[in-house]
Image (tube, rainbow, N blue to C red):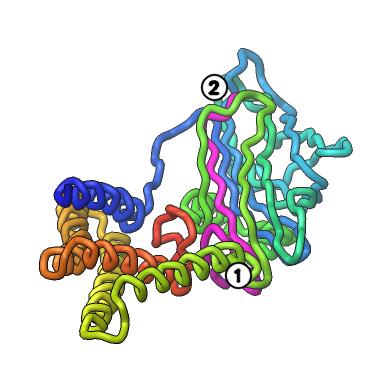
Amino acid sequence: MKIKFILIIMLLMIQLVSATILPPYYDYRQYNNAQYYDVMFDGEGEATILTNLEIRNIYSYSLEEYKLEIPGNSRVISIVQETPEGYKRLEYRKDHFSASSVYYLKLNKKLNPDETAQILIFYKANGYVKESLDVYKFDFQTIKQDFDIDFTRVVINVNTNLYLKEGKSNIEYTNNFLGYEKTLGASILDASEVKQYSNDIKYKQGYVKTTYNLDPLESFHVNGKYSSSWFNLYKFQIFLWTILAAFLTVLLVKYIKWGNLKNILALKIIFASLAGAISTSIIVFFSNNFMRYNSNDLLQLISGIILIILISFSFLGPSVYMGTKKGFLSGLWTFILTCIILFLIMMFLTDYTSPMPLYAVIN
């Protein structure tokens, strides 16, 4: 029974560790049609977006105009197309509807069958966010096109005075958007800067969601929450964990029977749990940074296996030791307290609230 219990916990730990310490996965494949988004929400529910549309003409005829639909109430700041001479602005006309706007882009260069084009759109939009009690629930929607979209990547961040439940923002992202507006809104485009933005957007970090094979006129939805108050985002979890901690404390006190020599056992359980949780957190933190900057696949694999073993020992070791030396119930209490302490450490120090890799949170 004890062996089965330990094996089950080790399997769960392997899943947790693999989702936590593995470095970012970048998709280097080439697609006929792809969309990349860098999105930032502010405290008024407005989204500022830079999108890179990679388009291949799959039709048997040439295209001189390109149609797309932007959900929500959108305001375009700049639309540019890559040409052999650099980047040039596109002229367009707009039809506004209640839930979206349709844009007709006049291409700078006719797009012949099987040819590709790259278009960058910098715009702002409302209508993706609903606010309640200082918690903003967003439902970001990607641009609809007449083509099948092979690959879509969206990265979400929020302004620096806000908290994103799915991760942690950084002032770097605000500076990025100031750069977007300055560069793409300038009277003369700086081709090297625009080119850098169009490439960087594919690898931006934050709250990242991807999807494949969108049908024509289908939009990809990315949902999440943010707030100006950390407490407002997590008040429900804090309430539940407080109740659970109080309940477990009462049970622990009842089990140990404070007032006799067994209070020494209580201290051992508490210290063992603290040791397991803190050591696991330290290993995860430093291993994440090591894996993040190491690009050798074989070394990553070997390091990943070693790290999984180390974390499994640091996480399960105190529980197994207490169970072996002081009985199964002592080991079980140590394991429960270790889980609670580890969760609190992750939640308070790294905003770890979902199975999202720590490299996206620590950035």
Q: Name the one closer to the observer, 270 or 82.
A: 270
Q: CA distance from mark 1 to mark 2?
A: 37 Å
Q: Residues within 10 Å of mark 1 (few under 14, many from 20)?
A: few
Quadrant the C terminus occupies = bottom left
- SS at mark 1 in the image: helix
Point out residue 270 in the picture as x, y percentages from the top left corner: 29, 77
Helix, strand or loop at mark 2: loop
Label 2 crowd bin: few (<14), some (14–19), many (20+), radius 10 Å:
some
Residue under the image location 55 percent in, 26 percent down: 115
**Label at residue 175:** 1
Residue at 61% of width from left, 67% of height from top?
235
| Whether residue 54 can be seen here | yes
The relative height of residue 253 versus residue 146 in the rendered view (above or below) is below
Residue type of the residue flagged with mark 2: Asp
Q: What residue is rendered at 79% in x and 49% in y?
A: 127
Q: Nearer the viewer, residue 147 or 207?
A: 207
From the image, tell me which residue sits under label 2. 114
